[in-house]
Amino acid sequence: MTTTLSKDDVYWQTHIDNYLSSSLSVKTYCKQHNLVPHHFRYRYYRHRQNKQTLSSTSPTIKSEFVPITVNVTQPTTFKITLPNGIHCAVSTPIDTTALKQLLGVLIS
């Protein structure tokens, strides 16, 4: 399935990506970029809905996970920082299936 984005979609997608990678509130981000907050929120939530629709109807989902091997002899805690700014501390040992499900929930 090929999707062509309009200039308007690209404009808002760029702002959404930049907002998500910032630590700013919507109000502050919009003020700094001369955007109307309720327009931004509308586009942001529309983007999230489209993303959820695509992921639920898409037969394949490209994974951006990199496989790693960790040899742990004693309980350890490691921290994961996601692109959307969420931090998650995980103690080992942890079931890899549970970890994958956790990351899937945090990313969505």
Image (tube, rainbow, N blue to C red):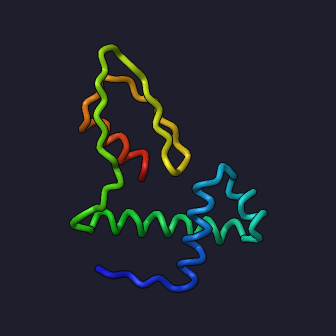
The x and y percentages for residue 93 are 30, 23
> Splitting the image into 4 quarters, where does residue 63 fall?
bottom left
Residue 74: x percent and y percent?
33, 14
Q: Residue at x 42, y 69 (%)?
A: 50
Rendered residue at 34%/68% (across/down): 54
Res 34 quadrant in image: bottom right
Name the image quarter holding residue 61: bottom left
81 or 50: nearer the eye? 81
**Is 97 situated left or right of 107 in this image?**
left
Residue in front for this viewpoint, 31 or 93: 93
Viewer-proximal residue among 53 and 104: 104
Q: Is residue 34 left or right of residue 101?
A: right
Q: Is residue 28 left or right of residue 101?
A: right
Residue under the point 42% across and 53% down: 108
Q: In which quadrant will I find the N terminus?
A: bottom left
Q: Indicate the position of residue 56 as horizontal and vertical percent values.
A: 29, 63
Name which residue lies at 55% across and 46% down.
85
Residue 38 as seen in the image, left or right of residue 34: left
Q: What is the count of numbered marks?
A: 0
Extreme residue in the left direction: 59
User: Is 2 located above or below residue 14 in the figure?
Assistant: below
